[in-house]
Image: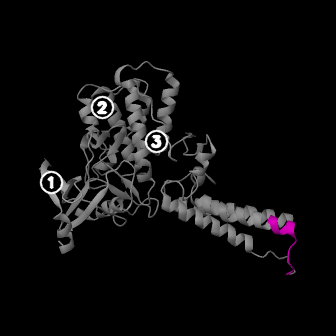
């Protein structure tokens, strides 16, 4: 261990042991006076915790320290004070409205993780890892999490032993990480984990919260039964493609039922997701209809995270593109300056071509996933599809310009 790491750890005073077997203790920072959870792991993905430490994800504990000590990793993360859904379940099954509300919040938490590049797959979603602090649901315990590089290097992510996953090697899970009862089939070595792996676990969680039992014992047959069955499909392709689709299905299930008298804790209304995450409706193919101008704004590449720094850089980038187009001199085929009308038309078409490519590659409104045809699972056909779509987007303004000014 480096001297600076030893110094950092010296500021944390151990208060109590949370789980001796897993090396988890409650500690206090002696100068800040804040409580943290200290974890010592022998099996881990260092890169996952590096990303979590550098980037702030909503309703995920903040990582204060990530320290390597030989073949172990010491992680100190924010302590979330609240009640787990496992503890909540001890007083009996929850109502549909409660479960719907909690799972909608969970979808909000998972969306930026699943849409990160590379994707962060939790792989251990269960009631004890879902903490209700006030009205907010927090997702904790990323010990089993891994990175999914499918969108970046398709089919090449594999294991690097004790230090987790890396985009080289075999393309399937080889060791079960997580809790067996909530693990999707692919976590047993049948395929690589993806966001649909977490969706499987969500289905098991929903079933358990509603019945107190696992699907193998009893499957819930109420209004959310169809959603649960799709979540826990054996074939990942039969599950919801992402948490956006799952959120829409949860809302539609509620709409189909109409008003309900839930009684007790179930009287709380379902969560409406805002802040650029899963507002409006969405089709099975991943595209959405928009309920307002704010939803469109939050779909613009660079503005989806809702974080100020990326949004500022994206806005400056768009302004630079517009400024460059506005000062570009437009000339005729003989080299003479173009007239005002011709200049304006050419600048509009140039803007359409450039921003069309930016929005296409940025998958604005899920358009790239369905144009020129639906997204493919295999990497080579998918690359060819995206290249073809980009060429179409680029050449439409060019063709229009040629037709107007042959």
Q: First in sequence: mark 3 or mark 1?
A: 1
Closest to the observer: 202 or 324?
A: 324
| Mark 2 and mark 3: Cα distance apart in space | 19 Å
Q: Which residue is mark 1?
A: 23
Number of other residues with Cα within 10 Å of mark 1, as a class: few under 14, some 14 to 19, many 20 or more: some
Assign the C terminus to one quadrant of the image. Answer: bottom right
Q: Secondary structure at mark 1?
A: loop
Q: Residue at x 52, y 62 (%)?
A: 380
**In the image, is residue 200 part of the stretch drawn in magenta?**
no
x and y percent of residue 68 in the render?
A: 21, 67
Q: Which residue is mark 2?
A: 208
Please say if 226 is above or below 348: above
Please say if 43 is above or below 335: above
Read off the magenta span. Answer: 335-345
x and y percent of residue 172 in the render?
A: 34, 56
Q: Is residue 310 left or right of residue 386?
A: left
Q: Is residue 399 visible?
A: yes
Assign the N terminus to one quadrant of the image. Answer: bottom left
Q: Which residue is mark 3?
A: 240
Label 1 vs label 2, nearer the camera: 1
Residue positioned most to the bottom? 335
Please say if 228 is above or below 7: above
């Amino acid at each position: 261990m480096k001297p600076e790491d030893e110094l950092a750890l010296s500021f944390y005073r151990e208060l109590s042991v949370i789980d001796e077997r897993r090396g988890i203790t409650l500690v206090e920072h002696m100068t800040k006076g804040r409580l943290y959870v200290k974890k010592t792991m022998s099996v881990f993905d260092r890169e996952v915790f590096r990303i979590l430490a550098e980037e702030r994800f909503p309703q995920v504990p903040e990582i204060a320290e990530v320290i390597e000590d030989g073949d172990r990793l010491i992680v100190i993360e924010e302590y979330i004070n609240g009640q787990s859904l496992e503890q909540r379940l001890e007083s009996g099954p929850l109502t549909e409205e409660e479960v719907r509300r909690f799972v909608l919040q969970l979808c909000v938490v998972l969306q930026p993780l699943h849409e990160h590049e590379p994707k962060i797959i939790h792989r251990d979603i269960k009631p004890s890892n879902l903490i209700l602090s006030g009205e907010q649901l927090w997702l904790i315990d990323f010990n089993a999490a891994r990175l999914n590089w499918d969108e970046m290097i398709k089919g090449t992510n594999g294991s690097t032993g004790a230090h987790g996953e890396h985009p080289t090697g075999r393309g399937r899970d080889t060791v079960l990480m997580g809790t067996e009862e909530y693990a999707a089939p692919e976590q047993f070595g049948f395929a690589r984990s993806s966001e649909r792996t977490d969706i499987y676990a969500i289905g098991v969680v929903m079933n358990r919260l509603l019945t107190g039992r696992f699907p193998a014992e009893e499957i819930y047959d109420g209004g959310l039964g169809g959603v649960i069955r799709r979540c826990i499909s054996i074939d990942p392709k039969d599950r919801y493609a992402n948490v956006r689709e799952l959120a829409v299905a949860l809302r539609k299930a509620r709409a189909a039922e109409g008003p309900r008298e839930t009684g007790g804790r179930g009287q709380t209304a379902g969560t409406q997701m805002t802040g650029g995450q899963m507002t409006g409706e969405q089709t099975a193919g991943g595209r959405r209809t928009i309920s307002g101008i704010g939803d469109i704004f939050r779909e613009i590449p660079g503005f989806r995270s809702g974080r100020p720094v990326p949004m500022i850089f994206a806005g400056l980038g768009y302004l630079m593109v517009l400024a460059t187009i506005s000062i570009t001199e437009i000339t005729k085929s003989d080299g003479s300056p173009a007239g005002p009308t011709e200049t304006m038309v050419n600048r509009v078409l140039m803007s359409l071509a450039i921003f069309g490519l930016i929005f296409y590659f940025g998958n604005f409104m899920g358009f790239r996933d369905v144009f020129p045809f639906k997204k493919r699972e295999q990497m080579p056909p998918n690359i060819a599809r995206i290249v073809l779509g980009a060429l179409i987007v680029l050449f439409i303004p060019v063709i229009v310009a040629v037709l107007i000014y042959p």
